[in-house]
Image (tube, grey):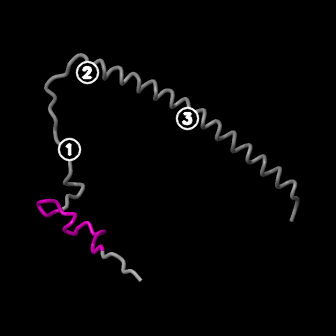
Amino acid sequence: MMQTADFGNCNNLADRLYWTWIRRIFIQRQMKTASVIVTGIEDSQIEALRSNIAELRTLRTELSSQREKLKLLREDMRTQVQKLRRCGASKQGPL
């Protein structure tokens, strides 16, 4: 019979294996984004951003219309399932 491997504290995040080089684990509060200062933007970048925004707006309107169609299909399916259940219950008769 073989002996299983000894992994020690591999699930323990406070174990030395998971420590940073300064010997501590950063919790979420201590992790934050750095500030960035933009010094210059070219006109081509602005136009690219505008076209991306326009594409995203069209996608959003398409998605909202698709969502409405799906909502109507879901309601239609629910009514059909209810009809089938009523039909099945009436065929079975009283127990």
Residue drawn 49% across the image and 27% down it: 61
The reply, left or right, for residue 58 in relation to residue 48 is right
The residue that label 1 is drawn on is: 33
The CA span between labels 1 and 2 is 23 Å
The residue that label 3 is drawn on is: 67
Earlier sequence position, callout 1 versus callout 3: 1
Front residue of 35/4: it is: 4
Query: As displayed, is residue 6 above or below residue 74?
Result: below
Q: Amino acid at mark 3?
A: Arg
Element assignment for label 2? helix
For the C terminus, which image quadrant? bottom right
Element assignment for label 1? loop
Which of discs 3 and 2 lies nearer the camera? The answer is 2
Q: Amino acid at mark 2?
A: Gln
Q: Which mark is residue 45?
A: 2
Q: In the image, is residue 71 part of the stretch drawn in magenta?
A: no
Which of discs 1 and 2 lies nearer the camera? The answer is 2
Earlier sequence position, callout 1 versus callout 2: 1
Q: In the image, is residue 16 part of the stretch drawn in magenta?
A: yes
State which quadrant residue 7 falls in: bottom left
Earlier sequence position, callout 3 versus callout 2: 2
Q: Which residues are magenta?
A: 7-24
Labels 3 & 2 near each other (Cβ < 8 A): no
Which x, y percent locates residue 87?
83, 50
